[in-house]
Image (cartoon, helix red, strand yellow):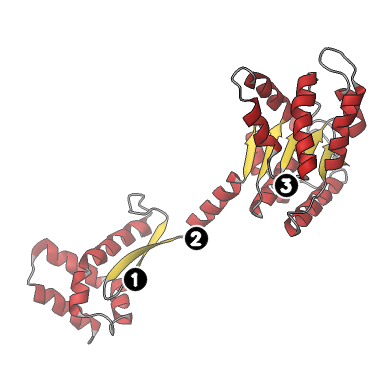
Amino acid sequence: MEDVGKELNRIIRSRGVDGRYRQMMEEILADQDVRQFIEEHKEKLTQEDIEKSFAKLYEFVQEKKKYLAGDSSMIAPGYEPQLSLNFHFIDVTYVPTDELLRVKREEEIRNRVNSLDMPKDIRKASIRTFEVTSGRSEALEASLDFINQYEASPKMFHKALFLVGDFGVGKTYLLGAVAHELAVKGFETTLLHFPTFAGEMKQAISNDKVGPKLDEVKRAPILMIDDIGADSMSAWIRDEVLGVILQHRMQEQLPTFFSSNFNMNQLEQHLSVTQRGDEEPLKAKRIMERIRYLSKEIWVIGENRRNG
């Protein structure tokens, strides 16, 4: 093809058009990206090829305007229109922008964290914003060790953490931060607030949904049980819900985290007494054997940040 500018003007004259259509053609052929594309592919494009592609060229020019203006009415919001050559035919392809890729990436990460009855801000928890103090550094270091070891060998069994500490010291936040970091690395995690979950399981009896709800939790690739021991448990919740979950996870060697205001010995004592006041130390011991197998006790010490 000869000089691009002359050739484009020749196309307009050869069509013998006036009025609005001529203005459209002139607008298309005056676009710098269109001219550059035709120049770069002039050895492969004939006048007829360009004329046949006018509809696509017009689409490109109009959508590019909308893209640059941030107009949401464009054909594919978040995608940048680009010209491409498809066997002697100029076409428009839509390429995702860096911003769209970032948004999609963040959405994928959020979707890997299944939060059941947890505070909304836990989804925004991050290792980077976890404030390190002398009483919290051991828990952070243990969390990072788990993340690194699990990422390196996800099919091997890794003992998780049993975070123990007073109210408001950051146990739940740290669980959320670990879940987020694991999600960034491509792993799915389920976090659940155990007292709320226990109440839902009791309600599930009436509509025959105990099995499905139990399966969802016990089979989670990585499970985080928050606030275990916060309420007294019925024997049924302890043995047929918590016990079943822990037994399955121990057998399948699935990572299981816990947070509690009780240390392990205190939790065993707590679990030994049912809501009715019955003492069943042997059953509590069985539960704790599974918890001790799945996790190691780590203290989180500090001031109550909820009052700050």
Of badges 2 and 3, the one in the foreground is 3
Residue that extends furthest to the top in the rendered view of this protein:
276
Task: Please provide percent x and percent y for residue 62.
Answer: 28, 60
Locate residue 84 relative to residue 213 in the image: left or right. Answer: left
Is residue 19 toward the left or the right of residue 275 in the image?
left
The structure residue drawn at horizontal position 22% and vertical position 74%, both measured from the top left corner, is 50
Q: Residue at x 56, y 50 (%)?
A: 108
Element carrying mark 2: helix
Q: Which residue is mark 1?
A: 84
Between discs 3 and 1, the one toward the N terminus: 1
Find disc 3 in the rendering and name its residue: 178
Q: Is residue 110 visible?
A: yes
Which residue does the numbered mark 2 point to in the structure image?
Answer: 98
Residue 150: image quadrant is bottom right
Q: Residue 66 is drawn in which quadrant?
A: bottom left
**Any part of residue 233 in sight:** no
Look at the picture and state if 155 lies above or below 60. Answer: above
Out of 283 and 88, give the one closest to the viewer.
283
x%, y% of residue 129? 71, 48
Element at label 1? strand
Q: Which amino acid type is marked by label 1?
A: Ser
Q: Residue 265, image x and y in percent?
A: 92, 31
